[in-house]
Amino acid sequence: MPPAALSVHLAIGQAYAWSVFKPPLESALGLSGTQSALPFQLGIVMLGLSAAFGGTLVERNGPRWAMFVSMTCFSSGFLLSALGVLTRQYWLVVLGYGFVGGIGLGIGYISPVSTLIKWFPDRPGMATGIAIMGFGGGALIASPWSAQMLGSFGADPTGIATTFLVHGVVYAVFMSMGVLLVRVPPDGWTPKGWSPPAAQARPLITTADVSARNALRTPQFYCLWVVLCCNVTAGIGILEKAAPMITDFFAGTTAAVVAGAAAGFVALLSLANMAGRFVWSSTSDLIGRKNMYRVYLGVGALLYLVIALAGDSSKPLFIVCALGILSFYGGGFATVPAYLKDLFGTYQVGAIHGRLLTAWSTAGVLGPLIVNAIADTQKAAGRSGSDLYTTSLFIMIGLLAVGFLANELIRPVHDKHHERPAPMVEKGQVA
């Protein structure tokens, strides 16, 4: 089951390598940094919306159906984008990669999560870490692969279109393995030698179940929505602009970064993103979800502060802090399904997770918009280097502080929202 999940998530995780395409697209089609971010932003918006509206369908139709829909939409998005670049119709790139591909992102993202939780009921944090690890690691493959193809095919419209075409075909083949491999465990299945505990003694872990409809009526859902939105905004702002950001940050210094090294930086961020999803979510099984988010948000704010204060004085310090931030960013994604399971039970956790991912849609617009718009404004004012990003960094610190406060407000869900057990039918009665 983990390979089935990874075959889909490693593919759709290509979204995190979008920054590799930004400079060639800007040069070939005459776009600004804000304009070149539009396909990525729309893709993340559609990820959250399709996950929210499709969560119930995924629960009803099963993971195989969801993975097939994801494969079809994600690959088709690349093919439309190839046509858009070739004909110099940028709106087709936005439509293809952002809208159509974004639907594939959302359906594919949630397709294996609830399935793996059912296969690993004894380690839900680890299970979701396995499922979502691939999404964070997708750019580890896609970033150098895309850079190599752009170098071979060329960074002109024809070369970019060919690169998109190859992506679409190869990812379709790769994702089909997940469609063929995935299975749902039989009802009542448990790992060998493990039985569910009679009661949970740890705080914030319920033994009851809450429906997706009732979850939307609880303050816990909205507090967790704010937590996820703030954590994602802070991470995705760096991730979407990673390659040009490190180049700008150290431009004019003795530690200037060339395009190949910038692509390597994107790959490193992807590795941290992927590792954080498994390591930190597994750690949350030991220390609890609320404590884990205290680390993500509190330590993450401190790392942003270090980057803002250090400026371009130390490239290794910048890279280490960025890797830490991205590991917390990935860990936040992988831990949230287990957090939802703790708060709302397993009854409709996939559907609740889909609705919560609207926070990702919001963050997918806010993060890149904040970083790109401020950088474009500062560049127009004649500033350069790390000065392009200082204001954005302090905004991210503020957002992480808001998320930290929202996490502190989370309490156990009130009994009135729990699903009532079906009444027992006595002998001789008609149900």
Image (spheres, grey):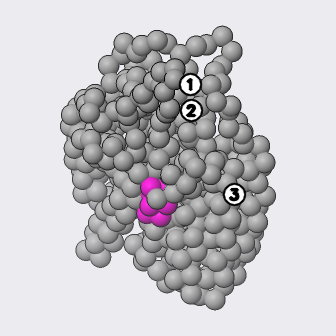
> Does the magenta portion include 160?
no
- The answer to whether the residue labelled 1 contacts the one labelled 3, judged by CB atoms less than 8 Å apart, is no
- In whole angstroms, how far apart are the C-alphas of marks 1 and 2? 6 Å
Task: Provide the major secondary structure of the magenta segment.
Answer: helix
Q: Which numbered circle lies on residue 239?
A: none
Give coordinates of residue 249: x percent, y percent: 40, 56
User: Is the residue 59 above or below the residue 425 in the image?
Assistant: below
Q: Amino acid at mark 3?
A: Phe
User: Is the residue 88 above or below the residue 429 in the image?
Assistant: below
Q: Earlier in the sequence, mark 1 or mark 3?
A: 3
Identity of the residue drawn at 53% across and 83% down:
90
Give coordinates of residue 102: x percent, y percent: 53, 64
User: Is the residue 204 above or below the residue 303 in the image?
Assistant: above
Q: Which numbered circle lies on residue 68?
A: 3
Q: Amino acid at mark 1?
A: Pro
Q: Amino acid at mark 2?
A: Ile
| Numbered label tally | 3
Q: Which numbered circle lies on residue 117?
A: 2
Return the residue nearer the eye: 216 or 132.
216
- In whole angstroms, how far apart are the C-alphas of marks 3 and 2? 20 Å
Range shown magenta: 45-52
Return the residue nearer the eye: 82 or 266.
82
Crowd rating for badge 3 (residues with CA inside 10 Å; few <14, some 14–19, many 20+)? many
Occupied quadrant, residue 380: bottom left
Residue 189 appears left or right of 132: right
> Does the magenta portion include 51?
yes
Q: Which numbered circle lies on residue 121?
A: 1
- The answer to whether the residue labelled 1 contacts the one labelled 2, judged by CB atoms less than 8 Å apart, is yes
